[in-house]
Amino acid sequence: MDRESFERLVARAVEQLPDEFLARLRNIDIVIEDYPGPGSLVRAGLGRGRTLLGLYEGVPQTRRGQHYGLVPPDKITVFQKAIEAQCRHRDQIAPLIASVVKHEIAHHFGISDARLRQIEGN
């Protein structure tokens, strides 16, 4: 899939978030890269050979105090080629992007991976 089409799917996934989440998104950039590099795996707490589809980097809203300000935006990276590699068919890409975007935005709101697994029933 070309980058522009992938970007549209990511934008659509964000637009389809519930209004109460969209209204609370603050100071965040969403970027697309092909694959995570070794540094991304380290920041995510993963070793080599592990798959990473998205990465949140920043200060979750639940940890922002009254002195939080004048900081660079939080960053969500969505890894295009890693997502495509997980999909056997093109029609599987959009739902996986939506899942990755929701997962990373949950981290922005302070929800841990362990809590997400509980919520998702995994």
Image (tube, rainbow, N blue to C red):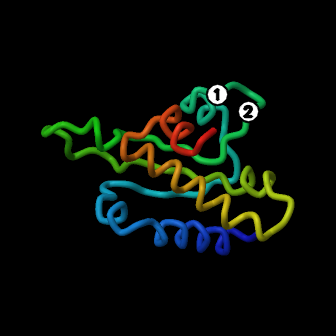
Q: Secondary structure at mark 1?
A: loop
Instruction: Give the vertical position of 50 relative to 91 (above or below).
Output: above
Q: Secondary structure at mark 2?
A: loop
User: Which residue corresponds to the image point at 77% horizontal and 58% vertical from the top-left?
Assistant: 84
User: Which residue corresponds to the image point at 66% horizontal and 38% vertical from the top-left?
Assistant: 37
CA distance separating discs 1 and 2: 6 Å
Image spot of residue 109 (x, y percent): 36, 46
Instruction: Give the vertical position of 94 relative to 39 (above or below).
Output: below
* Mark 1 lies on residue: 46
Instruction: Give the vertical position of 36 relative to 45 (above or below).
Output: below
* Mark 2 lies on residue: 50
User: Which residue corresponds to the image point at 18% horizontal and 37% vertical from the top-left?
Assistant: 65
In the picture provided, is 67 more to the left or to the right than 115?
A: left
Which of the two residues, 51 or 19, is positioned nearer the viewer here?
19
- Disc 2 crowd rating (10 Å Cα; few below 14, some 14-19, many 20+) is few
Q: Residue furthest front?
A: 121
Instruction: Give the vertical position of 85 relative to 65 (above or below).
Output: below
